[in-house]
Image (cartoon, rainbow, N blue to C red):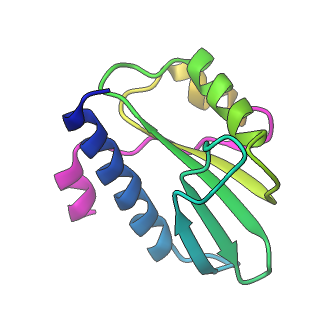
Amino acid sequence: MGGREAIRGFAIQTLACLLDSLELSNDPWRVVTIEPDSLNDKVDIRWGLASGKIRAQQVKSSKNQIGRGNVVAWCDDLKKSGPADSYQLILAGPIAAAVLEDAPFNGVDVPPPTSLDTVALVDQ
């Protein structure tokens, strides 16, 4: 990954975290950590919820279509990253239809993808 792609990836990861932090929930967050220590460095965002539960998220972005095979592998890696009460893979960019049709994978939630356009994410 080149510098430009890395910067875009970090920006998308940060914006995804900010958007999630504003979302209303029955179990609001109390603590959030970006790039926490994890067993295999697969957790990008770790949420400590008011209930005491932990949600682990990984953010992946690509300008190319994200296929089901990659999503399954990422979900498996995320699930092995360490203990959490819930896991979520956040995708940004175009995805194969099978990703949404077949989700969740290995107990990892995969919501509809976000935009790769950081300006659109900021506007959101």
On the image, the x and y values in percent for residue 64 come to: 33, 20
The part of the image, by quadrant, that contains residue 8 is: top left
Residue drawn at x 26%, y 34% as measured from the top left: 5
Q: Nearer the viewer, residue 104 or 81?
A: 81
Q: Nearer the viewer, residue 115 or 15?
A: 15
Residue drawn at x 80%, y 79% as measured from the top left: 52
On the image, the x and y values in percent for residue 111 come to: 56, 45
Q: Please state, as top left, top right, bottom left or bottom right, where the N terminus lies in the image.
A: top left
Q: Number of marks in the image?
A: 0
The part of the image, by quadrant, that contains residue 25 is: bottom right
Vertical placement of residue 29 versus 98, above or below: below
Residue range (magenta): 105-124
Instruction: Determine whether, in the image, residue 107 is placed left or right of residue 28.
Output: right
Residue drawn at x 48%, y 73% as measured from the top left: 21
Instruction: Determine whether, in the image, residue 75 is placed left or right of residue 63.
Output: right
Instruction: Determine whether, in the image, residue 86 is placed left or right of residue 33.
Output: right
Q: Main secondary structure of the magenta part?
A: loop
The part of the image, by quadrant, that contains residue 70 is: top right
Q: Does the segment drawn in magenta span residue 118? A: yes
